[in-house]
Amino acid sequence: MKNKKLAVRVNGKLQTVHQTPHFFDSIEDKENEGKKSKESVTQISEKENEEKINYNEKDWEQSLLKKYDRKPSKKPFGAFLDKAAGYKKILMVAFSAIFIGVSMGLIMLQFISQMEQGQNEARTIAQEVPTVTDDNNKEETASIETVPFEVTSFNAFVVQAGVFTTQEKAKASLNTLKGNGYGGMIWQRENQYYVFIGYANTKEEAKAFAANHLSALHDIYIGKEWSTPNLNLDINKNLIDDLKIYQQQLLAFLNQPTNKENTIDTFKKSNNEDLNALQDNLMETQSKILNDPSNQKHHVEILNRWKEYQAFVKKISD
C-alpha cells in the first residue's frame, strides 16, 4: 500500500498524516485517548462539583451551629434531645410554679384550720359565759325582795289640740304650735297620739285657761277629761319608801299646782337614778309655776311630770 496524505482533525486541529497500515489503529487510539480525556475531565468536574456541594452543606451546618452555639449530637436520638433541651427552662419554671403553689396551698390550709379552731374555742367560751351570767342574774333576782305598791289613780282636765294615728303627724302638729309660740306635749295611749296644750283640775278652770291663753287657736277640745288608773305593782323593797314620798308630793302638786304650801325644797336622794331625775324635774316645774302661773308653757310641763311618773312605775315593775 502506498503512502497517501490525509487531512484529519484531531482534538479540533486539522493535521496532515500519511496513511499507513497502522493509520486507522493510531486514529482509533487517539480517539480513545480523546474520549478518555473527556471522561477524565467530566469526572474531575463532577468531583469538584460534589466537593463544592459537600463543602457548601458543611459550611451551612457550621454556620447554623455557630448561630445557635450548639454542637451536633452524635447520639442516635440527638435530634430529639436537641429539641427537648430547648424546653428545659420552660419545664423548670413550670415545675417551680407548681411546687410554690402546692406549698402555699398547704400553708393557707393550715392557717385556715387554725383560725377555725380558734373560732370554735371562742364560741365555746361565749356559750359558757352567758350560762354563768344567767345563773348570777337568777341569784340576784332571787335575792331582791319585792313588796306590793299601789300607784294611785288621778283625774284632770286637759286642752287638746288634736289626736292622730301616727307619731309623725302628731309631731308635725306640735311643731306648728311651737312655731306660733305655744307649748305642747304628746301623750300616746293605745294606737293614738294626743297633743295637749293645757292642764286644769276642773272643766271650768280649763275653759278659763283656754280663754286667757289660747283664744287665737281654733278647733281645740277644751276640758277633755284625762285619767290614769289605779295600779297594784310589786316594787323593790329598797325603793318603796322613796317612791311613796315622791308619789305623795306629785299628787299634791297636780291637785294644786300654784299652792306654795306644796312646794318642796329638797328630796331625799334615792338609790335609783331615774327617781332622782323625777324629783329634780318636779322641783323645777313647781318653781316655774309659782314664779309665772299664767305661762301656758309651764302648764304643759305639769302634764309632762304626770306622764313620766306613769312611765317610771311601769318600768320598775317589769
Image (cartoon, rainbow, N blue to C red):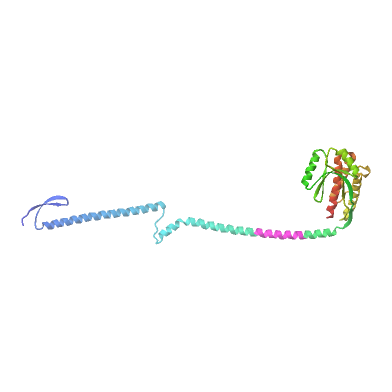
User: Is residue 162 or residue 305 the one in the foreground?
Assistant: 162
Residue 270 in percent (x, y) is at: 87, 50
The residue furthest bottom is 76
Q: Report whether residue 138 is seen.
A: yes
In the image: residue 178, left or right of residue 208: left
Quick one: quadrant of the N terminus? bottom left
The residue furthest left is 2
Residue 143 image-quadrant placement: bottom right
Residue 294 in percent (x, y) is at: 88, 39
Magenta segment range?
A: 114-131
User: Is residue 292 or residue 271 the one in the foreground?
Assistant: 292
In the image: residue 43, left or right of residue 267: left
Q: Report whether residue 272 is seen.
A: no
Residue 309 in percent (x, y) is at: 86, 49
**Secondary structure character of the magenta stretch overall:** helix
User: Is residue 136 or residue 179 the one in the foreground?
Assistant: 179
User: Is residue 85 or residue 220 the one in the foreground?
Assistant: 220
* Residue 118 lies in the magenta-colored region: yes
In the image: residue 14, left or right of residue 313: left
In the image: residue 268, left or right of residue 111: right
The residue furthest front is 219
Residue 318 in percent (x, y) is at: 83, 55
Say if 317 sits above or below 256 in the image. Answer: below
* Residue 181 lies in the magenta-colored region: no
State the residue at coordinates (18%, 56%).
33
